[in-house]
Image: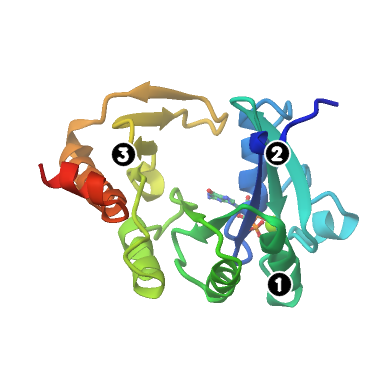
Amino acid sequence: MKVYSSSEIRNVAVVGHNDTGKTTLVSQLLFNAGATTRQGRIEDGTTTTDFDHDEIERKHSISAAMAYVEWKNVKINLLDTPGFGIFLMEAKAAIRVADAAAVVVSGVTGVEVTTEKVWKFADQFELPRLVIINKMDRERASFSRSLEALQKKFGKNVVPIQLPMGEEKDFKGVIDLVAMKAYKYAADGSGKFEAIDIPAEFKSEAAESREALIEKVAEGDDTLMERFFD
Ligand SMILES: Nc1nc2c(ncn2[C@@H]2O[C@H](COP(=O)(O)OP(=O)(O)O)[C@@H](O)[C@H]2O)c(=O)[nH]1
Ligand SMILES: [Mg+2]
């Protein structure tokens, strides 16, 4: 097995409310990075991190489970955790040993009880965090409503680095506000995508959000702030 130095390792706790899609997300990350040869699905009992008999039968995670991907020469350990209240200590234990938390939120339900609890744990252990607003293809999914709820609960430092391209049945992919590129996904669920120019209908929203992102980044650094105002 390949040996990685500590600078080449990231430990990421994947946390959030039950049913937001954490286990599915981990399986998709593994597939996309080439660590697995098929897309694991909850419905088929084939995800990588819900491998226990009870987890497959009940279709939800019970204990924390780890899987890893290699991405750009970095080993990323993904700690998938359960979102049910009674198994919350599993999430806390994962957060305690992780370098960062990926907080998964449903675009339909937004901030939920466990979202707040894992956020508090991440505060306690001073972890940087990335929020993933998931299930954007579902009926009644709303990015703006979810973002608003996140900012109301956790403050204005929650700022988008990507926007969804469309919502509900029109959800087609994401817009990356750093690269200012859009990634359009195939409708067949294969995970295949193409990088395209940002479609005209999303251009002004993307420009506005990019500005907000740059401003937020600059806020933490005086020299960047000066450059921003220049
Ligand atoms: N439509 C839709 N369903 C999803 C998405 N992500 C997960 N699911 C479904 O949501 C359910 C819960 O997913 P799971 O990964 O077990 O969530 P977890 O409890 O957070 O680990 C499963 O039926 C998944 O197939 C998504 O992005 N869109
Ligand atoms: Mg799960």
Q: What is the CA distance from the residue labelled 1 to the residue labelled 2?
A: 28 Å
Q: Residues within 10 Å of mark 2 (few under 14, many from 20)?
A: few
* Residue pointed to by mark 1: 88
Q: What element carries label 1?
A: helix
Label 1 beta carbon within 8 A of ligand 1: no
Q: Do the residues labelled 1 and 3 touch (CB within 8 Å)?
A: no
Query: Please, is residue 189 above or below residue 216 in the view?
Result: above
Residue 177, label in figure: 3
Disc number lying in front (2 or 3): 2
Asked whether 38 or 73 is in front, the reply is 73
- Amino acid type for the residue under numbered disc 1: Leu
- Which amino acid does the dot numbered 2 rest on? Ser
Question: Looking at the rendering, in which quadrant would you find the N terminus?
Answer: top right
Residue under pointer 2: 6
Instruction: Please tell me whether mark 2 sits on a helix, a strand or a loop.
Output: helix
| First along the sequence among labels 1 and 2 | 2
Residue 227: image quadrant is top left
* Quadrant in which the C terminus appears: top left
- The picture places residue 85, in percent across and down from the top left corner, at 69, 76
Please indicate, yes or no, whether residue 47 appears anywhere in the rendered image.
Answer: no
Point out the residue furthest to the front here.
Answer: 223
In the foreground, 8 or 141: 8
